[in-house]
Amino acid sequence: MNEEIVWPLMSNNISRFDLDNIIEFLKQENPKLTHGPKVIEFEELWSNWLGVSNSCMVNSGSSANDITMMALKEMYGEGEVIVPALTWVSDIASVLNAGLRPVLVDINRSSLGAEKGAILRAISKDTRAVFLTHILGFDALDDEVIEELRVRNIPLIEDVCESHGAMHKERKLGAIGYASNFSFYYAHHMSTIEGGMISSNDEEFVDICRMMRSHGLVRESRNAAKRRVIIENHPDLNPEFVFQYASHNMRPTEINGVLGINQLKRLDENVKKRNHNFERFLDVLDPKLFQTEFQVEGMSNYALTLILKKPDFSLRDVIESRLKKSRIEFRRGLSGGGNQLRQPYFIQRVGTLDLKNFPNVEHVHNFGWYLGNYPDMPISNFSFLSEVLNGLK
């Protein structure tokens, strides 16, 4: 890829309106820049939009993953976390970093999420959570899985970093599980430049997350009774510097909060535009060559998903050659570099697993791509793409 790309993965979605609001914020006599009132305001607006009671903003979606897994271990103890083999590295890394054990499962080709049967077979007495990823805007939830986890009292954690505004039935993804993680990286549905969010209806869980995002400091808890009890149990310590958890600095800034407040105002409308783009995209694909059956109900498309129906390395190379020649940016493997079982960090930390047990992940790893989708995409892009992919065999 080079600087002459005509169809990028993303055009920067921070608008002049967003920048002007940041400038107005900075014009204050003495604006607070680390997390404060604007972050809290965004957290409350986000919770209302999503349909949950509590949210905790952090400095990235990856930090949201890390804190969620650390807090989960505090509340549920050591054990295993079921994760799809198609996900972003930070999902599996967060499990490892928390001292938990990742159990990877294959995916469903229509939703790109963890396959129902694979999840149910992987559940054991050691399962502490199922950590599902909603890939590229598709709904990865299944009612049978939701009910089974409820009966077994196993937390469902939703990674919604690529799927802001997607729905399962009448509820937004991220409001259905025990907790959810979002990313506000500049290329996602909405952006705070860098940033992330943890959301949950469990106030105690989110309170632990708030302390963990700020070095584990007790003073960051919003539960006055909890703060008082912990501080009174440690009379030898400065009350302002009691560290309940061994954690890190994962705080956002007030600028992130200002951006989040502004971007949330147009998120729903941008989701509609993205979904219309995906519908146009499917219309130009040859259904004999490409997969056109996706779980589109409730979708909030993040990127245009191109998958060969059948394995064909020669055709794959022709497609990539045409895309490059046409200066269309793409990523093979779909989310996060494809099959995480193949990644060096996984082999080093977990070991080698038999790839034959993961045929669907292997297929999209080798024969799947995504192209850029963004609200202001020209309609002419789709006729252009039709010409690029026309006549392939």
Image (tube, rainbow, N blue to C red):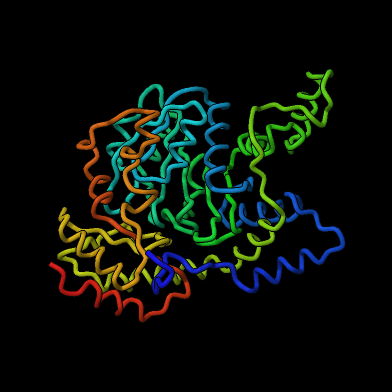
| Residue in the foreground of this view, choosing between 324 and 263 | 324
Position of 217 with respect to 196 (left or right) is: right
| Residue in the foreground of this view, choosing between 290 and 172 | 290
Report if residue 281 is visible in the image: yes
x, y percentage for residue 35? 73, 49
Residue drawn 64% across the image and 45% down it: 56
Report if residue 310 is visible in the image: no
Q: Is residue 232 above or below residue 287?
A: above
Q: Is residue 350 above or below residue 332?
A: above
Identify the image quadrant of the C terminus: bottom left
Residue drawn 38% across the image and 80% down it: 379
Residue drawn 53% across the image and 52% down it: 183
Identify the image quadrant of the N terminus: bottom left
Position of 356 with respect to 257 (left or right) is: left
Residue drawn 64% across the image and 27% down it: 246
Direction left: furthest residue: 393
x, y percentage for residue 346? 37, 34
x, y percentage for residue 258? 69, 61
